[in-house]
Amino acid sequence: MDKKVKIPSADLSIDDFFDLSDATNKFDKKEKDEEIKDLLNEDEKKSIKGRKKYARKTDEEKFEELKKKLSKDGIDENNPPYYGLDKKQFEGYKALAKAHFNVIGKIVCKKYEVEEISEDELDALAESAAPIVPEFLFNKYANLAITVGMLAIPRIIEHKKKELNKNNPIKENTEK
Amino acid sequence: MDVIGVFGVGESGKTYFVNQFILENYSNYDNIIVFANINQHKKLVKLDNIELNDFYDFLDYDLESIKNSLIFFDDFDALLLMTMSIKDVKSTFLLLQQYNNHVIYTAKILQELPDIVKSLTNILVIKKLTHFKDLNYLKNYLNDEEIKKISSFSMKDRLIIYR
């Protein structure tokens, strides 16, 4: 925890990654209605309209909350370094986040033909994601822990692009 | 080497259980890797260029780079596997199991791979007691502490170990 590593692409906005319309529109789909119906008994079905409204609202709220949390990307200088979690909790959530980043990071780098993500970079990503991991574990998005991993992808790409540009700055076209 | 299959009906808490397993045991492993069902959640983020094939390619060609790890296949999608030669898929996963300390599968992938089911050293079944959607609904009426109790108190009680 003491080693200082650069937080990849901490300057990126989370809006670059999320497509909120996709996230909320899925609740308009017929299949989602069917899923909700299956969960309800006959009496509850009568109030399905209310439940649908509730589901849509909570999703939007959830993602708004998530966005806010993620916008505080990287270590908060005013609350270093565990975001109110104790060290053991923080390390656990970091390990879990890293487990989700691990292969996806390797795959992304291979796909985009950039140098493989280093252990330090993976650690830094995991540290920045650790505070939001409990959000996924203690609400209905429990299986969305994967999202933590997927959020890493655009960050890795951006980070690697910057790295590539730094090492191989785009040359001006001097050909006549 | 342990090869663990975690079974349970939809949203019974299979993924939750394994994530908790990682949280409680991460210090015992040098490397922990999760292969998740990327297609299930793809719509939530912009990931047009990453496909399931990329994960399978990774398993096929970079297996040695993830030796001696805890590997967790979280609802890893079996659809692609169905379109491939079962013999290849089977040998890839059996090799993966030989290379690694622990491999944990949740049920979906196992549906297509009976030979892997036969090779399981542990079978865990999660009894579904509280639906996550209900839990989410209750969040309107309970405080965080109460919600945490409900979502975690029953894990021991609802875990059945068959092997």
Image (spheres, helix red, strand yellow):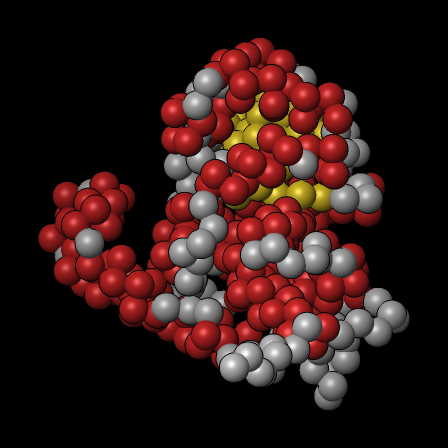
Which quarter of the figure has residue A115?
Answer: bottom right
Q: Compare residues A9 and A101 and report the one nearer the observer.
A: A9
The residue at the point 68 percent across, 72 percent down is A168
Q: Position of residue B157 (x, y in %)?
A: 58, 34
Q: Position of residue A67 (x, y in %)?
A: 48, 75
Q: In the visual, does B7 lie left or right of A82?
A: left
Q: Compare residues B23 and B62 and report the one nearer the observer.
A: B62
Which quarter of the figure has residue A61?
Answer: bottom left
Q: Position of residue B127 (x, y in %)?
A: 48, 32
Q: In the visual, does B27 lie left or right of B125?
A: right
The residue at the point 44 percent across, 54 percent down is B49
A133 is higher (above) or lower (below) than B72: below
Q: In the visual, does A45 lie left or right of A20?
A: left
Visible residue check, residue A113? yes
Q: In the visual, does A120 lie left or right of B80?
A: right
Q: On the rendered image, what quadrant is the C terminus of chain B found in? A: top right
Q: Position of residue B8 (x, y in %)?
A: 46, 30
Q: Compare residues B84 and B23 and report the one nearer the observer.
A: B84
Q: In the current view of this chain or complex, which residue is farthest to the bottom?
A: A78
Visible residue check, residue B9? no
